[in-house]
Each structure stands twice: as C-alpha cells, then as structure tokens.
Image (cartoon, helix red, strand yellow):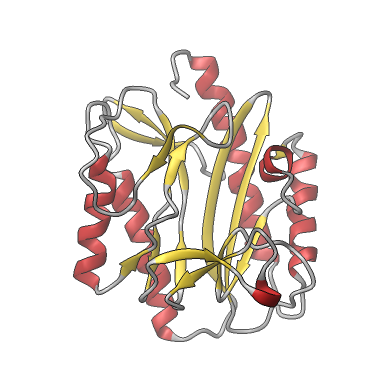
Amino acid sequence: MTITHQDELDGLKTIGGIVARTMHAMAKAMEPGMTTRELDAIGRALLEREGAIPAPEATYDFPGATCISVNEEIAHGIPGGRVLKAGDLVNIDVSASKAGYFADTGASFRIAPVRPSLDRLCRDGKRAMQIGIAQVGHGKPLAGIGNAVGRFAQAKGYTLIRNLASHGVGRALHEDPEEVPTWPTRDKRRIHRGLVLTVEPFLSKGGIWATEGTGTRADGWTLYSEPAAPVVQYEHTVVATDRGALIVTLPN
C-alpha cells in the first residue's frame, strides 16, 4: 500500500495501535502453566473488543487468532495445548485488520528466569529491527534494510534467517513488495514516499533457514530453524516518509 491521504494514515494508525496493544497485553499475561491456546484466546478477545479481525485466520485460514512460537518454533506457531514454562522464549506475532486496513507486529519475550545469552539475543534482535527501520525513507534503496541488518549481525556474531522476509502491508496482510530481504542483497528497488511495509529481521545464534517440521512436528504451519538454533524476531509496520520511517504499530 502507498499512503496518499491523511485518512489512510489515520486508518493504518488505528489498526496499528490495536495490534500493538494486543501483543503487549498478551506478553504481560504470560505465565508458567498457561497454554498457548489460552494466551491466544486473550489476544482474540482483545482484538474482538476493538472491532478488529485476526488477519492470519481471515486471510489464510490459520488455526488461531495470533501466531505463538515457543523455543525451537521460530514462526507461525499454532496456538494449542503446549504449556508455557519458566525459561521459555516466546514469539508473539499479531496481525489484524479494521475498516479495510491491515497492520502487523511481533516480538520475542522471555518467561523468567532465562539464560543471559537469550537476554542478549533479544536485546540485539530488537536493535537489529531498529537498524533496519532506520534505513526506511523516500528514495532510499530497499536493499539498505538488509545490508545494514547484515552488517550488525556479522559484527555481533549472529546469523539471519534468509527465507523469512519483511513485506508490504496495508490493504492486505501481504502485498507488494512481497519480499523485502532483511539480509544482505543487491536488490535494485527503491523505497517511495508513503510505502507501507514491515521490518522484521529474524536474528539467530546459528540458524540460516526456516523449515517446516517433519514427523510429529509437521502441522503445515510451524517453522523451525535449520540448523537448529535460538531465533528471535521483532517487527513493526512502518510508513516511508521524506524524514524517514513512521512507525504505526505503537501501543499508544
């Protein structure tokens, strides 16, 4: 989507605030002994109260209102009977629509106590997203996002999942540009004024690819790191302006 009028931006900010508040409320509600299905129900109730429609469910018939991925699961985790435990790394990804506008946000959270190395990974994962967002602006190269994130990851000794990309959003959950790499590329495309997109690098301690589970882990949705390694994801929906990126997925 490309924003051309103030009412479009207002609509995007409305749904952006809803998904952000939902994600943070879910994170605050997490506790050992809760199932991911119970956590998802909290998110669903919050979205419904705000008049928002869960986007993965409506768009792709995903079996949940939100995606909740725990530990070895790195994305698209199906809410279910998995019980959360102390020390878990939990990624909550919330996307929804209201009045025809879509927004998408996500973050990785820890249930204390966790290892210091996971705390560092989460801190650096959030920083990687911020570095990517700083590359968004009218006329800037789209590849600047992944190139900047890649430099940061390499300097810190991390890897990046290279087949889970950022994407355009706004009038649909996924739209042009369909794939915005958050790893180094030679992409020649340029960002234009008003472009709406996510910035969501997947930072890892060794993972390179996201793969579907096999055997008992094969559910058609949940993705895992290959090679197996801890992975975090932080995501905002942003709008490109002449002065840089405007973040719309803020909880205020």
Left or right of 202 in this view: 134: left
Q: Is residue 42 above or below residue 245?
A: below
Q: Residue furthest front?
A: 215
**Which quadrant does the C terminus fall into?**
top right
Q: Is residue 56 above or below residue 6?
A: below
Q: Position of residue 10 (x, y in %)?
A: 55, 23
Q: Position of residue 155 (x, y in %)?
A: 19, 69
Image-quadrant location for residue 140 = top left
Taking depth in this image into account, of 89 and 180 the one nearest to the observer is: 180
Left or right of 240 in this view: 139: left
Q: Residue furthest top?
A: 5
Q: Residue at x 76, y 34 (%)?
A: 51
Q: Position of residue 41 (x, y in %)?
A: 80, 57
Q: Residue at x 58, y 83 (%)?
A: 87
Taking depth in this image into account, of 92 and 243 the one nearest to the observer is: 92
Q: Residue at x 73, y 50 (%)?
A: 65
Q: Residue at x 33, y 60 (%)?
A: 127
Q: Position of residue 40 (x, y in %)?
A: 74, 58
**Count of labels in the image:** 0
Left or right of 190 in this view: 198: right
Image-quadrant location for residue 227 = bottom left
